[in-house]
Amino acid sequence: MPKKDIPNRRPCVTTDVGEGLAVTVSFHPKTGEAVEVFMTGRGKASDNPMQDALYNMGVKASELMQMEDAPDDASQAHAE
């Protein structure tokens, strides 16, 4: 599925969600649409397996946000 064309530099907002976790969402500068998400926790990635899980969740969420055409339903999203 084709991805949306997004610029390399975008405005973003970071929110502390508690327990040492933060979520950063970046937005398309022209449309204001959320196009990428980063999730981070405390500690070094090599010291904390949760960092890998947070990174992978952010990558998958970002890929879904950047899809040109969203899947018709959730079952199609699980097919990949």
Image: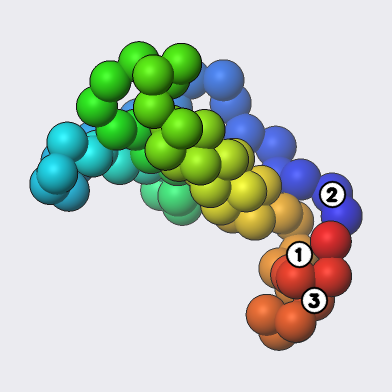
Task: Tell me whether circle 2 and circle 3 mark residues in contact (CB < 8 Å).
Answer: no
- Can residue 31 be seen here? The reply is no
Q: Between 3 and 56, which is closer to the camera in this rendering?
A: 56
Check residue 2 in the rendering and tell me which mark sits there, or answer none.
Answer: 2
Between the residue at mark 2 and the residue at mark 3, the CA separation in whole angstroms equals 15 Å
- Say left or right for 2 vs 78: right
* Helix, strand or loop status at disc 1: loop
Q: Between 57 and 26, which is closer to the camera in this rendering?
A: 57
Asked if residue 32 is positioned above or below residue 39 in the image, the reply reads below
Q: Which residue is mark 3?
A: 76
Q: Which residue is mark 1?
A: 69
Between the residue at mark 1 and the residue at mark 3, the CA separation in whole angstroms equals 12 Å
Q: Quadrant of residue 78?
A: bottom right
Residue 23 spot, x, y in % from top left: 30, 41
Mark 3 Cα-neighbour bin, 10 Å: few <14, some 14–19, many ≥20: few
Mark 1, mark 3: which one is toward the viewer?
Answer: 3
| Circle 1: residue type | Asp
- Say left or right for 75 vs 12: right
Task: Tell me whether circle 1 and circle 2 mark residues in contact (CB < 8 Å).
Answer: yes
| Circle 2: residue type | Pro
Residue 33 spot, x, y in % from top left: 46, 52
